[in-house]
């Protein structure tokens, strides 16, 4: 079975005042109904990867490689066709949901919009579909909620409204970019559960971008760890997050509260001039001389793929 | 730099050069006279006025007065507005109430009628003009500065400075001021533009300084010495055009500072 | 040698003639000792930051008093006040606003050194001495805060505070805006500094794991009142 989403050799460079290499040779696959968490810290490029898949990068971005979705290379699609794919086949849930909602339209109308635009449904039928989507997201009175305006709803409600709008067409692929950023503990757990529920129920695959390892652990089937624009380790969530191979993943887990707040020395490299050889070597406790010169390729170890010269 | 800024600066530079080096650029000296009321010709590109002065020469020499009044009164207004705005925004409380009350009072005073009244009692002159325009033009600057100061005051580094015991003057001048210049500069430019127009209007009304001819004075003389009646457009149009161009240049520079680009950063 | 707040009441006044007041904190008391960390928790908006600011003298309470070395803030002489200002500092949550964005790091340090009347000749050395405990290189001196990461900016903010060698530091969510590994760095750093130089911390955070790691004892603000956490 070929994967639903296959990213192969994706590289993204931004040419502005300086040349920023945001993503370098990223490859991963996402199967149907699978939940893949793309984890990493600020500036690692995980959000750029998500935007690349969704086709939302600015025109100034130089993209190379391929992104195969349901057999088609999204990078080769003109924008008119991409518009048809987005929303219908790829549902996107971004940070800060309140900004995604139009304050002048009712919630119901906005959730119904994808049905009208992509499926050509009439107003009444679309609103029915919207009510069903809202019910699915836990709104006890979908018709009542549909009549409200975003300003009348709390932040949490608006988040669920945006998720409803993104999932109303039951897209086979969902992309969620840091849906839990800036929220407190309970809300994070709640949203994570909600997303998982929605994905499983709708039979969708979920590409979840997050910096929160707890969310990845509780929700994801597989985890890909991002560092300095590369994927350094990818594998099943349970084993990547408990017995990782890559020194960065180990360091990351060690610096969590559960790991004892053990810091990784140094700071993340600049995307303008990343280190030679292995990008993690300046901060790696296991580095050898070879690591300063050679850039590691991704090798397979068990069911992980790891970018490290010291493996196996 | 985007479009308006480049043109604005270019145009302003032209006028500044004219005001700094009139001797080099004007075809005649300021006191040289020929036949009066001459129409434009090769010798006198813009003709001559009622006493035979070359109009083009007058135009070039007037640049400095118009620009001087504009920038000088804007400087006074900005200096006052900055001080009051910073003090009101930083100290808050009763200091703020008093200063904002004063601002409201000044807001109500009409500038041009006041100058007309003062001119009846005092000898009209450039100093008076600059002073009055400056003393009455600061209130919108003060408001903007106060608003920004209130905002910047709550940032970590300002609170840190207060924590460390820096003096209020030091904080206002060294921490807050550099972070509000991006709102002050456009207000300064717009104040300059407004002052130039006010000066032109007042000069036209005959309240300008007769010894220091500005563009507004030129139009005033054109009017009173029969230029309009004789339809000598080469006398009254050029100064008007110069005022307009100069004000547009200054305002364009001011507006371009106000445009802050929102950057979308994807991590 | 302690920093104590007692009976603190803070209310926000609004409306005509400021007659309408909404109480935020009512009658709180808290005490800090050198060398120890008190954790302060509570939901957002509970008033944790407000209490922090009152302790540092940045906000005046409607009732109650803050006492440093046994002297109430409002009764201090100029010299006592200066001593208080030097010894009680605060660190903030947002790394992008922790330093003046228009000043290079060097200038930001110089301002403090000038305040401390460190002679010009000794300033370079002082800056180097300030940067090494926080694990930063001298090359950051010529940069602007916008050119550095959140973690680096927080470390510089801390280094600046340490120039004053304060006895007490109120830390208002210092790591909430930072990545996981950077948070670990800063927390370890804070602990090391406490061991070496002995300042007392008030560590404000909404994250129970972080507070558990840093604090010797914890307080919670709820409904405007403060309780000791078991």
Image (spheres, grey):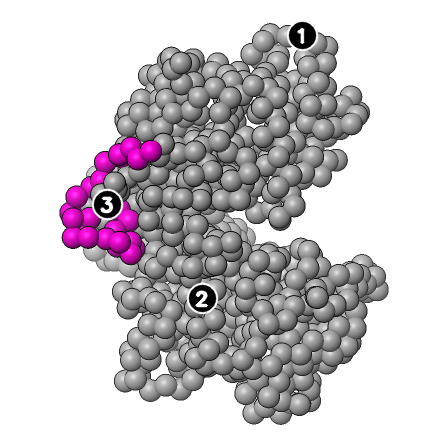
Local SS, label 3: loop
Instruction: Please give the label number shown on residue C188.
Output: 2
- The residue sitting at 27% across, 85% down in the picture is C121
Q: Is residue B96 above or below residue A91?
A: below
What is the residue that sits farthest to the right in this orientation?
C19
User: Mark 2 and 3 residues: CB-CB less than 8 Å, in contact?
Assistant: no
- Picture quadrant of residue A264: bottom left
Chain for disc number 3:
A
Instruction: Please give the label number shown on residue A122.
Output: 1
Q: Is residue C27 above or below residue A213?
A: below
Q: CA distance from mark 1 to mark 3?
A: 60 Å
Q: Is B191 displayed left or right of A229 in the figure?
A: right
Instruction: Please give the label number shown on residue A310.
Output: 3
Point out the frontmost of discs 2 and 1: 2
- Picture quadrant of residue A180: top right
Q: Are marks 2 and 1 on the same chain?
A: no
Point out the frontmost of discs 1 and 3: 3
């Amino acid at each position: 079975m070929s994967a639903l989403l296959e990213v192969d050799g994706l590289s993204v460079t931004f040419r502005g005042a300086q040349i920023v290499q945001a993503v370098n040779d990223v490859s991963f696959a996402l199967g149907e109904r699978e939940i893949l968490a793309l984890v990493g810290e600020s500036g690692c490029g995980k959000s750029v990867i998500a935007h690349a898949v969704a086709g939302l990068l600015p025109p100034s971005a130089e993209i190379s490689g391929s992104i195969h979705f349901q057999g088609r290379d999204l990078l080769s699609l003109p924008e008119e066709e991409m518009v048809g794919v987005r929303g219908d086949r790829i549902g996107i849930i971004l940070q800060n949901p309140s900004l995604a909602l139009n304050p002048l339209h009712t919630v119901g109308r906005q959730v119904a919009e994808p049905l009208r635009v992509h499926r050509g449904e009439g107003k009444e039928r679309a609103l029915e579909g919207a009510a069903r989507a809202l019910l699915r997201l836990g709104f006890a009175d979908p018709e009542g909620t549909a009549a409200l305006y975003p300003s009348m709803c709390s932040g949490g409600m608006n988040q669920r409204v945006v998720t409803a709008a993104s999932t109303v067409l039951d897209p086979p692929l969902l992309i969620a970019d840091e849906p839990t950023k800036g929220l407190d503990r309970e809300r994070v757990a709640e949203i994570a559960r909600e997303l998982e529920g929605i994905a499983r129920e709708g039979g969708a695959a979920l590409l979840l971008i997050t910096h929160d390892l707890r969310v990845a652990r509780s929700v994801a089937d597989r985890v890909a760890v991002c560092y300095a624009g590369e994927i350094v380790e990818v594998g099943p969530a349970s084993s990547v997050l408990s017995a990782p191979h890559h020194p960065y993943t180990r360091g990351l887990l060690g610096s969590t509260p559960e790991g004892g707040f053990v810091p990784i020395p140094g700071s993340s490299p600049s995307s303008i001039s990343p280190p030679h050889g292995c990008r993690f070597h300046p901060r790696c406790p296991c580095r050898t001389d070879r690591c300063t010169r050679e850039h590691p390729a991704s090798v397979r170890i068990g069911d992980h793929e790891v970018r490290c010269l010291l493996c196996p | 730099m985007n479009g308006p800024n480049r043109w604005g600066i270019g145009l302003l530079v032209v006028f500044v050069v004219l005001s700094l080096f009139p001797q080099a650029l004007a075809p005649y000296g300021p006191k040289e006279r020929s036949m009066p009321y001459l129409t434009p010709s090769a010798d006198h590109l813009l003709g001559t006025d009622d006493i035979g002065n070359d109009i083009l020469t007058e135009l070039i020499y007037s640049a400095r007065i118009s620009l001087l009044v504009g920038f000088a009164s804007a400087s006074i207004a900005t200096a006052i507005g900055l001080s009051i705005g910073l003090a009101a925004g930083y100290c808050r409380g009763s200091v703020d109430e008093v200063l904002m009350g004063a601002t409201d009072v000044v807001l109500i005073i009409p500038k041009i009628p006041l100058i007309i009244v003062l001119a009846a009692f005092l000898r009209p002159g450039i100093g008076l003009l600059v002073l009055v325009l400056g003393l009455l033009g600061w209130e919108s600057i003060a408001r903007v500065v106060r608003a920004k100061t209130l905002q910047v005051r709550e940032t970590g580094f300002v609170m840190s400075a207060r924590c460390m015991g820096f003096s209020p003057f030091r904080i206002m001048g060294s921490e807050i001021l550099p972070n509000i210049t991006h709102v002050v500069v456009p207000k300064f430019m717009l104040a300059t533009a407004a002052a130039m127009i006010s000066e032109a209007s007042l000069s036209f009304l005959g309240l300008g300084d007769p010894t220091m001819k500005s563009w507004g004075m030129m139009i005033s003389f054109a009017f009173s010495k029969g230029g309009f009646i004789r339809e000598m457009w080469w006398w009254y149009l050029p100064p008007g055009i110069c005022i307009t161009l100069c004000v547009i240049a200054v305002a364009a520079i001011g507006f371009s500072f106000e445009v802050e680009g929102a950057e979308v950063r994807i991590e | 040698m302690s920093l104590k707040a007692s009976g603190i009441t803070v209310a926000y006044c609004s409306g005509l003639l400021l007659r309408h007041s909404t109480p935020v904190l009512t009658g709180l008391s808290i005490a800090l000792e050198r060398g120890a960390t008190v954790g302060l928790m509570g939901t957002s908006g509970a008033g944790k930051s407000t209490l922090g600011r009152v302790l540092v003298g940045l906000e005046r309470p409607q009732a109650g008093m803050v006492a440093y070395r046994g002297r109430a803030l409002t009764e201090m002489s100029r010299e006592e006040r200066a001593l208080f200002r030097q010894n009680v500092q605060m660190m903030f949550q947002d790394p992008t606003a922790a330093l003046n964005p228009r000043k290079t790091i060097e200038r930001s340090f110089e301002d403090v050194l000038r305040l401390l009347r460190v002679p010009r000749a000794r300033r370079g050395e002082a800056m180097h001495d300030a940067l090494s405990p926080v694990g930063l290189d001298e090359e950051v001196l010529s940069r602007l805060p916008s050119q550095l990461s959140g973690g680096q900016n927080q470390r510089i903010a801390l280094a600046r505070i340490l120039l004053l060698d304060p006895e007490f530091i109120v830390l208002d969510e210092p790591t909430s805006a930072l990545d996981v590994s950077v948070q670990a760095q800063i927390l370890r750093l804070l602990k090391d500094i406490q061991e070496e130089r002995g300042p007392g911390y008030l560590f404000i955070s909404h994250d129970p794991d972080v507070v558990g790691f840093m604090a010797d004892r914890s307080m919670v603000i709820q409904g405007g009142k403060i309780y000791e956490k078991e």
